[in-house]
Amino acid sequence: MRDSTLSELADIRRIAVALVTGSPGEYGMCRGWTSVHQEAVISEGLGPWLYKSLGDPVQSGLDPNILSAMRQSYKFSAVSCLYREAALRKLLPAFNACGIPVILLKGFYLGSSVYVEPALRPMDDVDLLVREEDFDQAGHELERLGYRPMFHLSREEDRLLRLPIVYGTVSAVPEIIDLHRCIQSMDYYSFPADVVWEDAVEKELYGCQVFYLSTELNFIHLALHNLNHRGLLRDWVDLVTVLRNMNFDWDRLILLARSLGALRPLFWIFQELGDSWGTPPPASVSASLESYVPTRMEDRVIRHRFRYFWRLAARVARLNGWRARLRYFATRFVPPHDMTEGRISSCILHVKSKISLFQHLWRRS
């Protein structure tokens, strides 16, 4: 990332911190913003939220062209919300009719429960969690309603790893559904299903039964997702907004994190929230997080320079026996059988794609 981009991100973060923590903004605080700021605001997922939060453009000093781009991002997010609502009005009755309980995760939870309006929190897909025993039937229902899997879990190792399946539709505005059978992150942390479903809170949405995770478990899930994907500024605003706007139970957070084995991710999340976002946890929570002794693998998958390779190692370690592990590597990095019977150029492209993947992971590290 260019140094100038880092500088613009620092400018945006400073204003986001002031707005999300309720600090009074400086007059003309956005004066001097450039097209690089504009691109960063949109790519970091903050366009709609900043458009509504900055208020008077004269007061903020926002350039009219940048204001227009943020307004467009807000309008696009609002339209996307309508498409997601239409999709859920179709999906939820079908799941209810089949007796499949479903938990709405991440973006939809935030848009419907945390922010004052859903359009303020852009999202690319809808994450649905169902029980392991309902996973196949839920997939059949999605296909019956016109969704198609964007890839198939055709290998036994994929099923053992309990990976989600991404479903999509071909339309003017594609609908993407991530169907999950469990909550796991960084190929290391996996939430026991009994804890997740016992914590789920029943709600009614569009006349249908749905479930959400509790505020505290949602925070833990969002924290791990943030660390897993090197969170956007939007993801940090999510966490601060949950802490400041929701009825948050700190004791319950620690109890849940301990039962889920997720104390170490929270330690690093609160380090950042305290240092950069003006939102440290209570002293008792800090003491609990600091007293926890992490395993050797935890800091490696969370923040080690080569964390993406450690995560791959953690994924492979979840398979039983070296035969399954070697087979998993083979299916990932050796050209498929039907490709080896085809053109040599296809095999070369396959190998090049794997080399490019490792180069991408190395650069991200």
Image (cartoon, grey):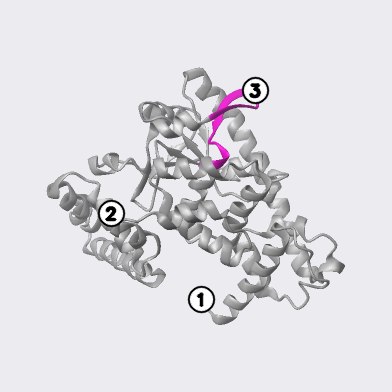
Q: Earlier in the sequence, mark 1 or mark 2?
A: 1
The answer to if 212 sits in the magenta stretch is yes
Horizontally, residue 5 falls left or right of residue 294, namely right
Horizontally, residue 133 falls left or right of residue 111, namely left
Q: Is residue 229 visible?
A: no
Look at the numbered disc 1 and give the secondary structure of its residue.
Answer: loop
Q: Real-space Cα distance between discs 1 and 2?
A: 28 Å
Residue at point 22% right, 57% down?
335
Q: Real-space Cα distance between discs 2 and 3?
A: 42 Å
Farthest left residue? Answer: 323
Instruction: Check disc 1 and give the amino acid type.
Output: Met
The answer to if 181 sits in the magenta stretch is no
Residue at point 48% right, 25% down?
101
Mark 2 burial class by Cα count in 10 Å: few <14, some 14-19, many 20+:
some
Q: Earlier in the sequence, mark 1 or mark 3?
A: 1
Q: Quadrant of the C terminus?
A: bottom left
Look at the numbered disc 3 and give the secondary structure of its residue.
Answer: loop
How many marks do you count on the picture? 3
Instruction: Check disc 3 and give the amino acid type.
Output: Gly
Instruction: Check disc 2 and give the amino acid type.
Output: Ala
The percent coordinates of residue 285 (x first, y second) are 52, 51
Q: Which residue is mark 1?
A: 1
Dot label at residue 314: 2
Please, is residue 362 above or below residue 53 in the view? Answer: below
Dot label at residue 207: 3
Q: Which range is magenta?
A: 201-217
The percent coordinates of residue 87 (x first, y second) are 59, 34
Residue at point 14% right, 46% down?
321
Look at the numbered disc 2 and give the secondary structure of its residue.
Answer: helix
Horizontally, residue 12 falls left or right of residue 186, namely right
